[in-house]
Every structure is written in C-alpha cells, then in structure tokens.
Amino acid sequence: MNEQILTILTWLIPAMPISAFFLIALLAHRNRTLSWVIAWVAIISSLVMSWTVAISVLGQGLHELEEHPVQIASALRWIPLGDYYQGQWLDTGVAVDPLGAIMLLMVSFATTMIFVYSVGYHNWGHGLGKHKGEPQHDLTEEPLLARFFGYMCLFGGSMLLLVVADNLLLLFIGWELMGFCSYSLIGFWYARNYPEHQEITRIPPRAAAVKAFMTTRVADVVMMLGIVFFWWAFGTLNFSQAFTAESLEHVLELVGFGGLAVMTLLLFTGTVGKSAQWPLHVWLPDAMEGPTPVSAIIHAAAMVSAGIFMLLRIFPLIAISIDGTPYAGLIIAGIGAFTALMAATIAVAQYDVKGVLAYSTISQLGFMVAAIGLGGYVAATFHLITHAFFKALLFLASGSVIHGMEHGAVHVHDHHHDPQDMRNMGGLRHKMPVTFWTFVIGGLALAGFPFVTAGFWSKDEIFAEAWYQWSHDGKVLAIVVFVTLAVAALLTAFYTMRQISLTFLGKPRTELAEHAHESTPFMTVPLVLLAIFAVTAGWSGISDRFLGTDGIFYNFFHHYAGAEYFHLFEELAEAGLIAHAIETIPWSWVPLIVSLVVALGGLALGWWVYARRPLAAGQTDPMVGTLGPLHRALNRKWYWDELYNTLFIVPTVRFSERVAYEIVDKGIIDGILHLVARVFYTIGGYLKRFEEVVISGGVDWVKDRFLGFAREFRYLQTGKVQEYALISVFIATALAVVILLINSGWLGNIF
C-alpha cells in the first residue's frame, strides 16, 4: 500500500476514537443509542486501519524490518524551544515499527470486543434505568450510557496514541489521558454505597477511583523526572533518534552506567504504578468497582499493558543498565518476581470473581517485568500479547457470570447476597454454557495448559530465558527468578481451577445461581472471538528448536518482535555495552518440564481440593481449615492496605487535621489574616473619626451657613409682584443717587 496512505491511516488510528469522545460529549450525549453507535463506528474504523497498517508493516519481510525497523514515520513541528536551543522545535509524530504493529493488532481487537460487549452489559434496549451513578439492579438500561462510551472512546484512543507515539512526551500524554479515563470509569457508579447488611467488604467506586488516581500519580511524578533526565541526556525525546549506538555511547560518556541506570529506574517507576507492581499494586484490585468492561480494558487492552509497553520502548536503556550495573536488573527483576509470587498467593484466598482475576493480572504483569529485568525482551513482549487476549476474555466472562447472577437476583428479589462472590455461585456450567466454556479456555490459557493454549507458550518463553541466563551465564538472579516464577505459575494454575470449580461446578449454592441464565449475544460473541485468540495467539511463538528439532517450527513472533532492535543490539554487543544480542535461545528440556509440572500440577491440585467434591451450600472453603490464620492473611491481601493506612494514610490525615489545618491554616494563616484584618479595621476606625470630625465637620459648617443665609433670604421671596416692583424702584433710586454723587465728585471728596 502507498506509504502516504499508511501514514494518514496511522494518524487516524487514535484520532477516530478521540474524535468520537468529543462528538459524544458535545453533540450526542442526550442520545444513548447514537452514542454507542458512534463509539462502535470509531473503534471499528480504528480496528480496520490498525490491522491494515500492522499487516503492511509486518509484510515487509524480516530482512527489511531488521535493516529498517521504523517503516512508517511522520512528524510535525510542535513546541518552540526558545533562544537557548537556537530556535529549534520539539517535533512530535507517529511511527510504526514491529513492536508497534504487534501492539496495534492486539489493542485494537481487544478494545473492539470490549466495546461490543459493553452494549449488552449495560442492558441496552431494556428500558431506561432510574438510578444514575449506580448499577441498575432491575437490569434496565444504564442512564449514563453516553457518558460511559464517551470515556471508553477516549480511553481506547489514548492507548492507541501511546502505541503509535514516536517520542516519550507524546507517549506520556496518552499515558496521563488513560489515568484520567481510569479515574472517571472506576468511579463511574459514583453514587454506589454498600449497606452494612450486605456481605460486601469492598470500598465504594468513588473511593476506589481516588485511590487509583492518587497511587498512580505518585509513580507518574517520578516518571516525569526520568523524562526530564532523558531529554537532558539525549537532547531529544524521539525514540529513533535516541536509540542509536552513537547516541547511547555518547550518553554513557556523559552520565556513565550509574546515571543511565538511574534514568532507567526513574522511568521504570512509572511502570510500577501503571502496571500495579509492588509496592504500588494496591490500587488495581479496587479498580474492579467500575463496570466489568472497564476492568477488561484496564487489565488487558490498555492501562496496565501501557506500563509494560513503555519498558519495551526504552528497552535499550534497560539492556545497557542491567549489564552495566548490578542493581538495575536486580531491582527490576526482583520487583517483578516478588510481585508475581505475592499476588498469586493472595489470589488463592479471594472470593470475588473479579478480585481473583485482578490479583492474577498483577501476578502476570510481574512475570513480564521479571523477564524484562533479565533482558528477555521477546519473552516479555510475547506474554504481554497473549495475556491481553486471555485476560480480556476472563474479565468479560466474569462480567457475564455476574450479569447472569444479577438476573437471578432480580428473579428471586434477593439483593442481600453478593453476585460477585464465588461462594454464592456454583452450578453455572449448565446455566451459562457459552460463558462456561470460554471461561475454561481463558482459565487454561492463564494456567498455561500445555501445548494448546497461548499462555503455555509465552510463559515457557520466560522460563527458557531465565534458565538460559542461569545455565549459560551463571546469573544467580536468573535462577532465583526462575524458581520464584515457577512457584507463582503453580499457584496460578491452582487458583484458576479453584475459580472454575467454585463458579461453575457442583450445584447452585444460592437462589441467585439457581435462576441465572446465559447472557445476550452482544456479550457472548466477543467471548467466543477472544477465546480463539487465547488459544491460537501462542502458536506464533513456538520455538524454532522446540523439542530439540531444527527446521520444523518457525518462531514468527521471536523473529519479528526481535527485529525491533536486532541491528542495534548487535552493534551494542560488539561495543561491549551489552552481553548478548537478540538471539534464539538454545533448546533445553528443563524449562519445558517445569512448565508442564507447574501447570498440570497446579490444575490437578485445584481439581483435587475443589472440583473432585464441589463446594456445597453452607460448606466452608477447605483452604480455610488447611491454612488457618495464613488463609485470613492471604484473604486480607497480606494486610497491605492496613499497613499503608497505618504508615501513610492515617499520619497524613492526622498531619492534615492537626498541623496543616489547626496550626498552619487556622493558627498561622488565619491568625495572620485576622491580625491584618484587625489592623486595617483599627485604621479604618481612625479614618472614619477623621472623616466625621474634620472632613464632614468642615463641610457641615459651610452647609449650615448656607442654610442659615437661605432661611434669612427666604423672607424676601413673598411671591407678590407689587413688592418686587417696589423693591426694584428702591434699588434703582439708590443706584441713581450713588451715580449722581460719583459724577458730582462729592462722594470722592468724602473718601
């Protein structure tokens, strides 16, 4: 296709949904049907354009992509930099390379499926709901549907903008727009509260929105420092200009390995917040308070994926940092591995059907971060793509389950039981067959079921990367990460089977589950389509040397994703700045065996505990008795919320109340203001007295004299013409006498 046409399409990819946001907000916000139609048109247009551009780029051939990774590039003058930079301009634009093309395929498809699903989820066409800012428990149409699709358009457009951005600043703009959208959509049901009689321990949506916004802002401020450092060191924010061998060598001479590692970690902090890694992971589970499509777009298509994508964009910095300094890789891989294991242990003890998936997302993102910290660029990219497909599937399927449970609640008029609590479910396999089978496919992909699902191939790639670095390079960090991730993968398979068993197997444990039924095609069709990708997406990344063969398999994903930095890493390796270029990892049976053991072992253990004898109504979770107090600690999420509340929230509130408010605001600021007020009030009193005595007194004296004269003169004003004529004669006579005396000189002699 013509390059100019591809460039125009690339600009339009994010522009379409962002324009739809403004169109809905300004013109169509009073028409709910028109709003979602506009949203559909915009996102489907972006889908078609994204796939057209991506296929055109990837279709250039591997050799061409390795020689010229950036196939589409277009820039505009944006911000004048002033006299200090000799009149230069900061340019901004779009660019599509192999990494961007792969992301466009995933983001556009997953987002489109979520948009389609949302129409059925919000009960379009079932009568207008009466409760704004709350879920419609009577399953009527969401009254704020236009607002929802407006924000969703901005959300999807911001992620697409981030993907095609050719510089770090434009990427950050998309990054922050998603932060705003996540805040708006997590708190979409702003009026929702949980009465004390309900068995719900979650926080209200508006509190969850504030928590998410404030937590990610902490990380974003640090990330901004990294962007400023990047600009100062490289003199540009453009990725293609910064990530050349000459530019990187120059920056190393300027700041050294330590400075480059600091820059990397500052930018990495943004990912810690956006991708919910420890210690800033606490916002993501509470983000489930938004509608389920919001959960899906946050956990799969956008938001948390953006954090990993940003690390992949700046991967040359990470590669040099982890090879040049010992602590950079230790921090990144260590945080990733710890987060993966920690979140997996918490997911084991959760009962909220979306809460399990939330901690699963945190854990799987930890896998990706750990892989990046070890230098596994391709492995992290592969797992990012496959995870997006099966996690979007799982969240949408969980929303379908909740939707079915709410139908049961309406049928039996029971709004006491929590429709998201898996202990209230059971037996949904026969009630919701499409949801069940698609959920099973997504769950098996998450667990890494061998050879069939996408999750198996992408996790195996991470295990292979870690094992290679341990067996070939002797990195102790690599074997620690390998073991930690293996345990996390075992727990992942276990809690996946636990979730499937508690939700779908056995008999219904409440009337809600008994009267649940399958969701509408608006919701089930996206599930089926995502399920296809949850299986087939992994087949593109089968190792060239799988099972020790040679020439049978072709690792399409490795070669095309690796083309992004193929020649750059060769040059950096020759210069001694990194240990290895991007290369195919030698075959080893150990990662494969570990993948098989942890996936099948975890699923088998979950089946033994939960599926062999499904939980009956009123029966206690077997893990409660097995783990005892440990189960409560895991259910309470390792008490991170309580710890942060004690360490940060309570001291901050007390400081605000007792110091900032009582002392600074009321004592100092109000005291100064009151003192100034009293001073000016006193001065005003003296000025008032001066005005009364001096100014007003003098004026009043003159006034009184004139009034007295007027009173005396008033007697002459009789209104009788005869008297006026007589007085005139007297005056004329007097004047005549005076004139005669003057003329005769007699008056002059007297004086």
Image (cartoon, helix red, strand yellow):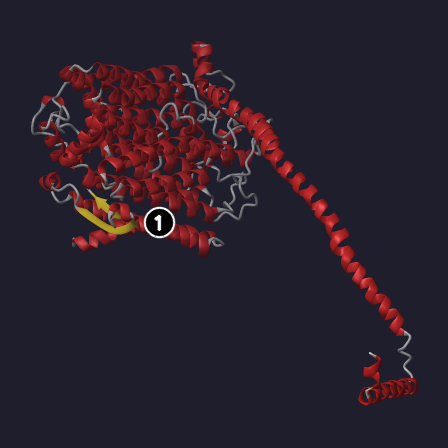
* Residue visible at 84% across and 87% down in the picture: 741
Q: Residue 34: x and y, percent? A: 43, 54
Point 54% across, 25% down: residue: 655
Mark 1 burial class by Cα count in 10 Å: few <14, some 14-19, many 20+? many
Residue at the outermost front position = 749
Residue 712 placed where, x, y %? 89, 71
Circle 1 SS class:
helix
Above or below, comparing residue 134 to residue 654 in the picture: below
Can residue 40 be seen at all in this image of the molecule?
A: no
Q: Position of residue 12 (x, y in %)?
A: 28, 52
Can residue 650 be seen in the rendering of this structure? yes
The answer to which quarter of the image holds residue 283 is top left
Q: Nearer the viewer, residue 627 or 581?
A: 581
Which residue is more in the foreground, 365 or 315? 315
The image shows residue 690 at horizontal and vertical percentages of 73, 49
Q: Is residue 616 above or below residue 662?
A: above
Type of amino acid at the residue the image marks with label 1:
Pro
Residue at point 16% right, 33% down?
Answer: 250
> Looking at the image, how many numbered discs can be counted on the residues?
1
Which of 746/419 is in front? 746
Q: Tell me which corner region of the image, top left, top right, bottom left or bottom right, holds residue 132.
A: top right
Judging by the rendered image, the residue that carries numbered circle 1 is: 17
Horizontally, is 311 left or right of 623 in the view? left
What quarter of the picture does the C terminus occupy?
bottom right
